[in-house]
């Protein structure tokens, strides 16, 4: 099944309207900045935590370049989510960033 792709222009509108954004990068990558308001869930945890995501909203899935987010979006679509892959990922994002702290349980300390 081909995953719907969302270009950056449409993603900006989705973000500005308060749409749900799922960032599937690793915790260390989040330290480089995230789209403000994004829900952070590494790709390896999507399978076990998909039930925590909203099925009633479109889920725009983003990663660094668009590869991992495409995998996550495909999986979520199989579960009945309205999930789309953000083309170009964070490499294409020119908007503001927020800088979350690395959770202690993910930092190894």
Image (cartoon, helix red, strand yellow):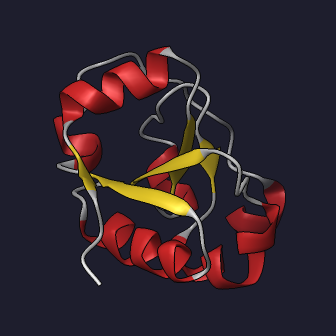
Front position in the image: 70 or 3: 3
Front position in the image: 24 or 4: 4
Tell me if I can see residue 54 in this picture: yes
Q: What residue appears at the point 69 percent right and 39 percent down from the top-left corner?
A: 101
In the image, residue 16 sits, relative to residue 67, either above or below, namely above
Q: What residue appears at the point 20 percent right and 50 percent down from the top-left corner?
A: 87
Q: Is residue 72 left or right of residue 107?
A: left
Q: What residue appears at the point 47 percent right and 59 percent down from the top-left corner?
A: 83
Q: Quarter of the image for the C terminus: give it.
A: bottom right
In the image, residue 83 sits, relative to residue 70, either above or below, namely above
Count of labels in the image: 0
Q: Position of residue 104 (x, y in %)?
A: 81, 57
Front position in the image: 99 or 48: 48
In the image, residue 42 sits, relative to residue 89, either above or below, namely below
Q: Quarter of the image for the N terminus: give it.
A: bottom left
Q: Position of residue 41 (x, y in %)?
A: 63, 61
Q: Position of residue 33 (x, y in %)?
A: 45, 34
In the image, residue 41 sits, relative to residue 80, either above or below, namely above
Q: Position of residue 99 (x, y in %)?
A: 56, 29
Front position in the image: 3 or 98: 3
Give the quadrant of residue 65. Answer: bottom left
Q: What residue appears at the point 39 percent right and 16 percent down from the top-left corner?
A: 96
Tell me if I can see residue 63 in this picture: no
């Amino acid at each position: 099944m081909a995953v719907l792709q969302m270009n950056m222009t449409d993603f900006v509108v989705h973000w500005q309207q308060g749409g749900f954004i799922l960032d599937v990068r690793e915790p260390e990558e989040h330290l480089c900045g995230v789209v403000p308001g994004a829900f952070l869930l590494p790709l390896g945890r999507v399978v076990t935590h998909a039930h925590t995501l909203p099925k009633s909203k479109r889920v725009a899935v983003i990663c660094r370049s668009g590869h991992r987010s495409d995998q996550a979006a495909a999986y979520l679509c199989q579960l009945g989510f309205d999930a789309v892959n953000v083309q170009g990922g964070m490499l294409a994002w020119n908007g503001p960033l927020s800088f979350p702290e690395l959770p202690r349980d993910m930092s190894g300390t």
